[in-house]
Amino acid sequence: MARLPSAIFLALLALLLMVGLRYGTAPWLFGGMFAATLLAWIVAERAARRRVAKVQSTIAAQSEAIASLRSNLDVEAADKSAREREIHHRVSNNLQIIASLVNMRQRVLADPTAQAALNDLHDQIAALALTHRTLDKGPSVANVDMRDFLTSLIDEQIADRDGPDARVTVIVHAESLMIDADRLAPLALLAVEAISNVRKHALVLGRGVVRVDFSVVAARAVLSIADEGLADPPDLSHEGPGRLLMAGFARQLKGCLDVSVNDRGGVTVRLNFPVVGPATSETG
């Protein structure tokens, strides 16, 4: 901004010289005009510098305010993340305690039907506890990598329970996809229900193969849980409570559920749902 008055001054000086040489202006008149021009230039130059200094001061103040705001936002975000992690931690611990209580109740029951019902409830509570534990321990409190979560879920539901001498083979092929916390719970509960059905109907002989696949194609994801049917042939002629529960979880995810007999003689549960979009509040 200071260059403009300097340019004007030089232009006026050149004009005065041209006029003086052309018309023979008196030296005193030329000197007066030169002094007036010089004074005007000095005033304009100082005014321009004051404006520049004022603008620079305003920019510096605004930059400092923005930096302070960003720092405050970072602190608030860190505090919010810490609070959310603490909430997930406490919820996970409480759910694990409830699961342990359900397990204790199950052991004292003599009715096989009641034992099976409590076992299913225990698995569902344990899966919910895992979702909160994953959100607490993971890099983000808002999203979870579905590949890592499925691996942990399978370990809890099949590998850890059956022990190192079990003859159950679990094959997991999962792609990476970040799932938000709202959709993680229905996904976990649907997977637990499908695995529970596999344990009841396909792994009753204590051996078998369970295949878990998770893939992402374009804007949709597909979760598939299948067994090889080493026990009784599957009967899918009617919908039991497990099918109804899975259908409800699929609706929460705005997805499509398909339960069918596969070419290995077992059952395949396939969930196809959109990659983005919030889950609904429907419980099925």
Image (cartoon, rainbow, N blue to C red):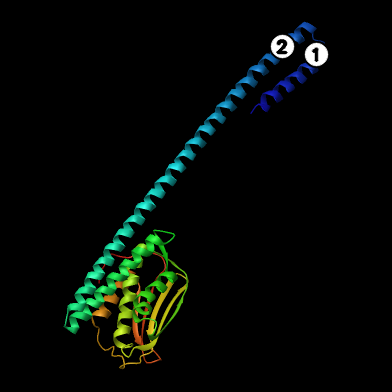
Callout 2: SS: helix
Tell me the quarter of the image containing the C terminus: bottom left
Query: Mark 1, mark 2: which one is toward the viewer?
Result: 2
- Residue 22, position in %: x, y? 82, 15
205 relative to 162, above or below: below
244 relative to 28, above or below: below
Rate crowding at label 2 as few (under 14), some (14 to 19) or many (20 or more) other CA atoms within 10 Å.
few
Q: Residue 172 sits in which quadrant?
A: bottom left
Q: Which residue is mark 2?
A: 35
Q: How many marks?
A: 2
* Residue 45, numbered label: none
Q: Residue 99 sits in which quadrant?
A: bottom left
163 relative to 13, above or below: below
Q: Amino acid at mark 2?
A: Ala
Callout 1: SS: helix
Q: Is residue 58 left or right of residue 84?
A: right
- Residue 268, position in %: x, y? 37, 84
Q: Residue at x 31, y 56 (%)?
A: 87
Q: Earlier in the sequence, mark 1 or mark 2?
A: 1
Q: Which residue is mark 1?
A: 20
| Front residue of 105 and 263 | 105
Mark 1 vs mark 2, CA separation in Å = 15 Å
Q: Residue 41 sits in which quadrant?
A: top right
Q: Residue at x 37, y 50 (%)?
A: 80
Tell me the quarter of the image containing the N terminus: top right
Q: Amino acid at mark 1?
A: Gly
Rate crowding at label 1 as few (under 14), some (14 to 19) or many (20 or more) other CA atoms within 10 Å.
some
Residue 107 visible? The answer is: yes
| Front residue of 247 and 38 | 247
> CB of mark 1 within 8 Å of CB of mark 2?
no
Q: Residue at x 29, y 74 (%)?
A: 123
- Residue 143, position in %: x, y? 41, 62
